[in-house]
Structures are given as C-alpha cells and as structure tokens.
Amino acid sequence: MSEYGGLVLGENYSHKISEEFDSQVAAERGAESLENLGIPLAQIRIIQPNDPSMAQKVEPETQGIARSMVKAHVWFGLIGLVVGLAVAGLLVTVGPALTRSSPVMTFIAMGFLFPVLALLIAGAVSLRPDHDLIIEKARTAKENGRWTVVAHCDSLEQQKLAKTAMHHSTQTL
C-alpha cells in the first residue's frame, strides 16, 4: 500500500506516472525501461491511439477508489465529530455566555457542523483530483495519435524510480 498506511487511501497503486510517445516501438521501449528498473510489468499499461480501454488502463483500481471514498468519509466524519464535540465542550465550559447558557444546542450545532465540514473535505480528497492530470494527458495523447505509458507505482520511491526511466515529458502524481 502507500506510505499513508492505508488509513484513508484504499488503492494499492496510488502513485502514477505517465509518458507520451510518438510510436508503438518507443512506447514499448519506455515500458521495457520501467521493467528493467524493477517495476513489475503488471503495473505498466500502454495506451495506444484510439484505445477503447483507456479508462481501465489509467484507473484500473475502481474498487480501490470506492474503498478510498468509504475510508475517507468514515475517518474524516469521525474525526470531525470528535473535534466538534471537543469544541462544543470547550465553548460550554469557557465560551461566550450564549454557548454556556445553552449547552445542548451548542453540542448539537458543533456536533453537526464539524462532521459536515469534514465530510466535504473527505469528498474532495476521495475524488482524487490529482488523477485528472494524467487522465487528461492520456486522453489528449490518444486523440492526437500518440502512445502513452502509465506506470502504477505502489510507493513514492517506485514513482521516483519510474521518473528516472521516463524523463522528458513525464507527468507524475
């Protein structure tokens, strides 16, 4: 899994790197150079022009993304609830007169507000907007008749290793 320990991310290969090539031969050489550096062939995908399975090659872990969404929402929601109740307790104890005079409403308000804000943040994290860069790059390359090699890395170290193999127009996340 990633260096986050799987607390929020449910993907096995949360780091990606991609490179565009002008021909199939060049793309295959790029994939071979990744394999020679120790990245397993199962983690490398070649997207050809007009490839009908581009989405599956760029994002093969749809179940992992779903796990990420569930994990992020559960963890962020619980943390938001705990923080909200702690803030409510602080406000009821030493806060303004309004919060001290109405402790139940303070706990209800903070116990609702903080989890909602945390769930909004979880939504932003779990949608993985960082993947849009590689998806758009692969789509543009495919439409322009170019080949794309995508390496699905399981750690930042493996991503750095892949970046050394594919260097001139590499997109990483």
Image (spheres, rainbow, N blue to C red):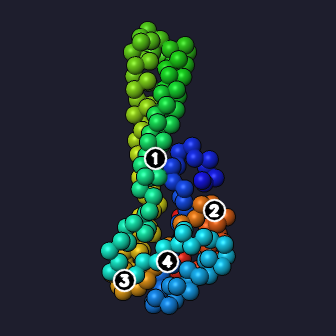
Q: Which amino acid does label 4 sit on?
A: Val
Cα–Cα gap, marks 4 and 3: 12 Å
Q: How crowded is mark 3: few (under 14 residues within 10 Å), some or many (20 or more)?
A: many
Amino acid under label 1?
Arg
Please, what secondary structure does the residue beneath circle 2 have? helix
In the image, what residue type sits under mark 2? Leu
Pointer 2: what residue? 156
Q: Marks 3/1: CA distance?
A: 31 Å
Asked where in the image residue 164 lies, by quadrant, the reply is: bottom right
Which one is earlier in the sequence, the residue at label 2 or at label 3?
3
User: Could you say whether the residue bearing mark 3 is in a helix, strand or loop?
Assistant: loop
Query: Nearer the viewer's eye, disc 2 or disc 4?
Result: 4
Circle on res. 149: 4
- Mark 3 vs 1: CB contact within 8 A: no
Distance Cα–Cα, label 2 vs label 4: 18 Å
Front position in the image: 119 or 152: 152
Residue at point 52% right, 89% down?
26
Per the image, the residue denoted by label 3 is 49
Q: Which mark is residue 139?
A: none
Q: Which of marks 3 and 1 is nearer the N terminus?
A: 3
Residue 37 percent location from the top left of the image: 67, 76
Residue 67 circle label: 1
Q: Which of marks 2 and 4 is nearer the N terminus?
A: 4
Image height check: is 102 above or below 5? above
